[in-house]
Amino acid sequence: MLSKKKDYIFCILFGAYIAAVLWITLFSRLGTERRSFLLPFHSYVEILKGNRQFLLENIGNVVLFIPLGVALKWSGAKDVKKAGLLASLLIEVLQFTFALGTFECDDLIHNTLGAVIGAWCVGKIGGEIRLGDQMRKVILLSMVLCSAIPVGYKEVRHQKMVRLAAIYDREDGAKNLLVLSGKNGYAWNTDVYVKHLNDGSIQIKGTSDKRSWWPIGEVTLEPGMYSFSGLSGVDKDTVGLTLETDNHRFASDVGPIGEVRFALEETAKLMVYVSVYDGCDCDVIATPVIYKEG
């Protein structure tokens, strides 16, 4: 039995951990128009092909759920393996439902393994916490407070991107409607890094041996005629900017073509991507913008 003081510390840290997991797996992600499903052991096939990113992700998924196993075991959970599997399944279902990521069966395996490892470690150390109503309230309060920190950070970042987007309002009064996400990262499974710069532009730098993408923003537009631009002077099938709605990609030639105009007959949410192609070796600056014309 842990001391009362340690019980409270445990509950605070457990609430913070839950908030961190929710941020990493759900809240920090930019939704897309795509939903995909990977069968069991897909990651191992890719690892055998030399794909190190899947190996790192598998290790990360194991490590991510070790604290959950520790917390469940310390709180007296009878079946840590089942609880870890259900928690992982809930995250994967939410990612798939809201198009926040790929439903990967291998994630279920590695998350559950992490929970089991955490429980095993507790078995070696010992200790137990009895979670009464007061302790549950401490966990909930800690989770809410710790969730507010990254959510607040995300809002601050959004307001910064709103101000940067306004830099590119046109002199004729047309407003730049595209507010970028400000989230940096590698185009999936490539060495192409997309970095948001402090002047509202983005740097796209690196190489790729496959077709890939990185989401940089989303925008909801009313019916009308629009122009989309922000990258030019690059070779075809190297790197570009593209739009997508309802799993349909269009305006995918921005880059080789300086500007694309398109019409919407009804209100639509558009996803904006950096697209890279097999053979891409680039170091370019893009300033993605969307204006309503007429």
Image (spheres, grey):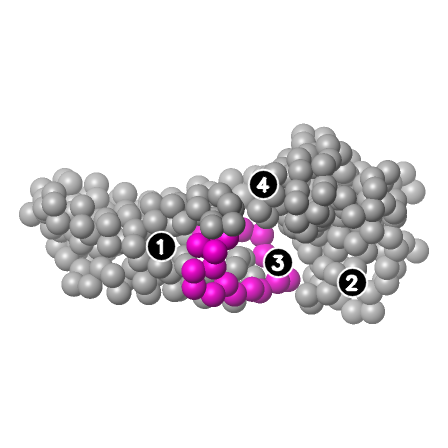
61 vs 2, left or right, is right
Please tell me whether mark 2 or mark 4 is closer to you in this view.
4
Does residue 176 appear in this view? no
- Amino acid, disc 4: Gly
| Percent x, y of residue 207 | 67, 38
Q: Which residue is mark 2?
A: 222
Which disc number belongs to residue 252? none
Chain part drawn in magenta:
25-46
Alpha carbon separation for disc pair 1 and 4 = 23 Å
Q: Is residue 15 above or below residue 83?
A: above
Alpha carbon separation for disc pair 2 and 4 = 30 Å
Q: Which residue is mark 4?
A: 185
Please tell me whether mark 1 or mark 4 is closer to you in this view.
1
How many residues crowd around disc 1 within 10 Å: few (fewer than 14), some, or many (20 or more)?
Answer: many
Alpha carbon separation for disc pair 3 and 4 = 15 Å
Which disc number belongs to residue 110? 1
Mark 3 or mark 1, earlier in chain: 3
What's the residue at 75%, 52% (across, down)?
Answer: 242
| Percent x, y of residue 197 | 67, 32
Mark 3 or mark 4, earlier in chain: 3
- In which quadrant will I find the C terminus? bottom right
| Percent x, y of residue 290 | 80, 49
What's the residue at 58%, 52% (across, down)?
Answer: 30
Q: Nearer the viewer, residue 186 or 74?
A: 186
Q: Which residue is mark 3?
A: 32
What's the residue at 13%, 49% (across, down)?
Answer: 123
Determine contact: label 3, label 4, CB under 8 Å. Answer: no
